[in-house]
Image (spheres, rainbow, N blue to C red):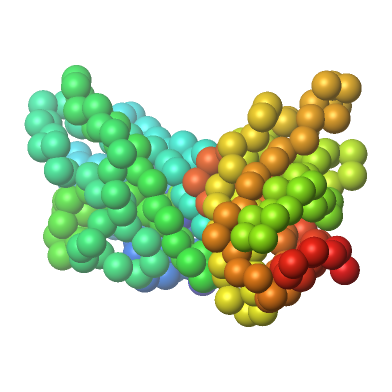
Amino acid sequence: MNGTPCLKDSGYCDEVEGQCDLGYVTESVEFPSNCMTFSGCFSSCSKTCHCSGGAEDCNFLTGDCLSSTCHPRWTGDQCQTDRFETRLEKTNPGVAIFSCSFTASSGQSLPSDYMQAAVGKSTTEPWIIRISSDTSGTTLNYSFIHEYMGPEEPIYCFVGVPESSSEFAFVTLPPRDFFVLPSYNGVPELLEFGYYHAAIGWRQWDPSSDTGDGPIVGYKIYVRSGSNVVLAKEVQAPSIVTNTKRSAENATEMVMYNVKGLEAGPTYSVQIAAIRDGINGEGEQGPALTFTSRQGWHLK
């Protein structure tokens, strides 16, 4: 529907799924969720036209383009084959890992830097970082990674030059899907102490009593004196814990770390956070163990 917010920017669609109605597309990077452009339809308006000249360029009976030229994003019979393909991985919050591919039209040679990825309303550098590329054959296939803070913004891949409508085409990625970061509910234990050190132990993350998604690849121990962070150290897990039922051996296996360099007298607090696989996998810190260091330490 003209002006209706949508999730996809063009193609076969219906109002129920929140996509553009047949015959409408969006050609705006700044407003990729608004289907504002009528590009025409054909075959009893069951298919959307994708001709380079818009609705006036499309035969409403056959879908053939009067100019014999498809919009830069489309190819094939009646310009119904999308030259873009995208794949978006499920990740931890704050990370987007995705790939975009773009297929050359007949006789077209694509330079290696022809396709880029961007975020929000930007069509200028810096682009999203590429982590791999395959430019063999007639298809450009790039993988990207984007780390961010704050609210999500639309991510899109594009080819050509934004100022040139005859060469520019883009595809917006679908909404991202995230894992739930692990929440660790165990209280650390004070196993042994001296004047300037403390041996801390804690049970492993357990999906039956803790929350979030595995696998758990490590932990982070936080030691504070008041509001000051004395130590923030990642510790490797003795064994990887998944979301499945843990074995008896894993259930009793404890993680230990010897905290050194403490001072005599202050009160310290210790908290543990579980880290799941992938970038930005650290979850919330669990409840605190509190102790006071002095000659003959005691546990509060």
What percent of the width, then of the height, locates residue 64?
30, 38
| Residue nearest the viewer, comparing 142 with 297 | 297
Q: Is residue 96 left or right of residue 49?
A: right
Q: Quadrant of the N terminus?
A: bottom right
What percent of the width, then of the height, locates residue 257?
65, 45
Q: Quadrant of residue 134?
A: top left
What percent of the width, then of the height, locates residue 149?
48, 66
- Give me the residue at 76% from left, 48% from top: 192
- Give me the residue at 77% from left, 35% from top: 254
Is residue 88 visible in the rendered structure shown here?
A: yes
- Give me the residue at 12% from left, 31% from top: 108
Q: Quadrant of the C terminus?
A: bottom right
Q: Is residue 288 left or right of residue 197?
A: right
Is residue 72 visible in the rendered structure shown here?
A: no
Q: Is residue 231 left or right of residue 28?
A: right
- Give me the residue at 66% from left, 29% from top: 238
What percent of the width, then of the height, locates residue 288?
79, 64
